[in-house]
Image: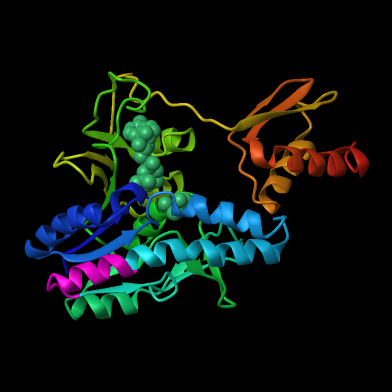
Amino acid sequence: MNIIVQKYGGTSVENLERIEKISDKIISQKKNGSDLVIVVSAQGKTTNNLIEKANKYSKFSEQISSKKDLDFLLATGEMQTAALLSLYLNSKGYKATCLMGFQAGILTNSNFSNAKILDIDNRNIIQLLNEDYIVIVTGFQGMDKFGNITTLGRGGSDLSAVAIASSLGAKKCEIYSDVDGIYTSDPRIVENAKLLNSISYDEMLEASSSGAKVLHNRSVNMAKEYNIPIISKSSFSNSLGSEVKNEIYENSTVHIITKKDNVTKICIVGSMMLSNIETISKIYSLANSHNIQIYMITFSELAINLIVDSNIAEEFMKILHEELIEKNTID
Ligand code: ADP
Ligand code: ASP
Ligand code: MG
């Protein structure tokens, strides 16, 4: 098979005009003889609007039940896009069908709102490709072992696309957004930013973990693992885009400058911190068990400083206080 996975983000599917535009790309690729899986995001600001709506209907807590309900709600955004794109392509005489994450076989853990993909049973997709369908899959969502709908974290459709591409052994995964590819800096901030032809998986992983949201960091990590080339391209132009792949550089060159917003530094002060392996490992295990990502950590004799997302910083401070001070189980 000659499988290509394409992913179209929120702005690329925002309205009928944009669906028409991306359909031209899909159809021309189909005419080239590719077996196509199309992963879509929710239209425009749909996900944000749904979150706002959920907040109006509930005083949203960290309770599992509300996170589960929220995932159920948010998953509807991608479903609308998948259905609308399928309706459009079929009306144009192309054989297309749409699948939710679970129908595409995406099994995740039960960590609602930030679920991890555990496995993909791709038999349904393969059968539909064999029947010559353009297979449209909702990005950002999967299903846990209990049959609950889960979501993969904001921006997670990139990860859905790369995961499906990896599971199918696709030739490449094309991620379409509103910029021509990966630039030396966010082109919306740095006017002179240059489009990169290519960048290594490792550098892109670092950049996307540090705010270059043109690609989701977990998608880059997975592409590296399975050696799937990612091509970041524009939905609106015919630019060749930028390829993320294995690169070997011998010279020292700066490739991307990025920034991460909405992060907070937590400072843990004490004595002999540098050599206290137990405290350090406890911090990591607490972050892990509460699904908190530590973006950066530094150590000195007097302090451990860590950088985490601002929206969970206060909660993590409480957890750290309880475990490292109140319980005081560490010498
Ligand atoms: P989508 O909604 O299609 O997933 P995103 O908004 O997540 O698209 O990603 C595209 C955005 O990433 C661009 O509009 C751009 O502002 C931003 N961006 C940040 N850093 C970079 C970079 N180094 N190169 C290209 N785009 C970048
Ligand atoms: N619609 C989801 C979000 O806005 C997922 C995505 O766009 O990748 O985060
Ligand atoms: Mg994105």
Q: Is 1 situated left or right of 55 in this image?
A: left
Coloring basis for residues = rainbow
The image quadrant where one finds the N terminus is: bottom left
Residue 151 relative to residue 38: left or right: right
* Figure quadrant of the C terminus: top right
Please report the bounds of the magenta region as a residue range: 83-95
Answer with left or right where residue 248 lies relative to residue 322: left
Residue 110 counted in the magenta span: no
On the image, the x and y values in percent for residue 211 come to 46, 33
Residue 6, compared with residue 201, is above or below; it is below
Q: Which residue: 23% across, 42% down?
A: 234
Residue toward you, 7 or 83 = 83
Q: Main secondary structure of the magenta part?
A: helix
Choose top left, top right, bottom left or bottom right for residue 148: bottom right
Residue at the spot x=69%, y=59% of the render?
A: 58
Identify the residue at image location x=30%, y=20%.
191
Residue 64 in picture, x, y percent from top left: 70, 63
